Image (spheres, helix red, strand yellow):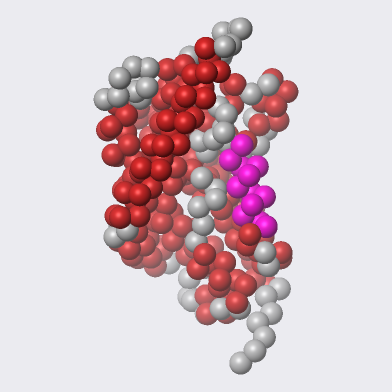
Amino acid sequence: MIRAYLSVFKLRINTGLQYRAAALAGIGTQFFFGSIFIMIFMAFYANSTEAPPMSLSQVITYTWLKQAFLALIMLWIRDNELFQLITSGNIAYEMCRPSGIYGFWYAKLLAQRLSSALLRCFPILIVTVFLPAPYRLELPPDWLTFLLFLAVLTAGTLMVIAISMLIYISVFVTMSPGGSLLIFSIFGEFLSGMVVPVPLMPGWMQDIVYLLPFHWTADFPFRVFTGDISKLDALKGLAAQLAWLAALASFGHYTMNRALRRVVVQGG
């Protein structure tokens, strides 16, 4: 079974790496929006009457990381082929496969995001490191912090895939890909700190955000990179990420199995 998942993962990676022109266009767009976000934060910091909980340098680094790893962490990135399978009834062909649908789709989505991120992240990171202060991306304080960042970013990406799977599973009930995607992406993007870093939110809102899984996908890894979160807290957070990942994957398996038991395919 694992070999089937690895095969589809490799196939999707190779397919995704062929879209270099689309990636180049995406890099230009991400530089544009990154610059806009940074100018907004600079205006906010220049007129702040109190010392913000994150320095301007940390927020700028946070913003460039968000742009570089957008393909890994955004919930609105979707595979329309999966939506088409569900709404058209062609899910019947998927159910004939000898492998489980949850693992098969999980491998496809993971490969899709990784191939897109591999094409886009390195040019953005390399260019932003050499920008003049205060616009440049600041490197992590030491190698251990960088290794912790890679670990928590990996766990965060796996969590994003598990949450994305819930979007596809919900379409079995709603039959509305646009509606499910809109709800998850709007709330997920805000609660993961993709609009405003979580430390800059009001205290009452942070209490809500920390109860949900979304901030572990983006806000937490980026704050580990900037040094806003200590190494000990990063290790504790990694354990929390793995616990959330196990819970989300288990819930996804359970709901997927229930949804597949109720599938009715009509027609020739």
> In this view of the protein, can residue 139 be seen by the observer?
no
Tell me which secondary structure the magenta stretch mostly adopts: helix
- Quadrant of the rendered image containing residue 22: bottom left
Q: Name the image quarter holding the N terminus.
A: bottom left
Does residue 232 lie above or below 149 as drawn? Answer: above
Magenta-drawn stretch contains 234:
no
| Residue 130 image point, x, y percent | 26, 25
- Quadrant of the rendered image containing residue 212: top right
Residue at the image point whose x is 29% and y is 55% from the top: 20
**Camera-side residue: 263 or 2?**
263
| Residue 266 image point, x, y percent | 67, 86
Residue at the image point whose x is 45% and y is 36% from the top: 33
| Residue 253 image point, x, y percent | 60, 59
> In this view of the protein, can residue 89 be seen by the observer?
yes
**Camera-side residue: 17 or 252?**
17
| Residue 167 image point, x, y percent | 61, 56
**Camera-side residue: 111 or 22?**
22
Does residue 77 lie above or below 7 as drawn? Answer: above
Q: Residue furthest bottom?
A: 268
Total marks placed: 0
Residue at the image point whose x is 38% and y is 37% from the top: 31
- In the image, the segment drawn in magenta is 179-190
Q: Name the image quarter holding the C terminus.
A: bottom right
Residue at the image point whose x is 60% and y is 7% from the top: 50
Magenta-drawn stretch contains 189:
yes
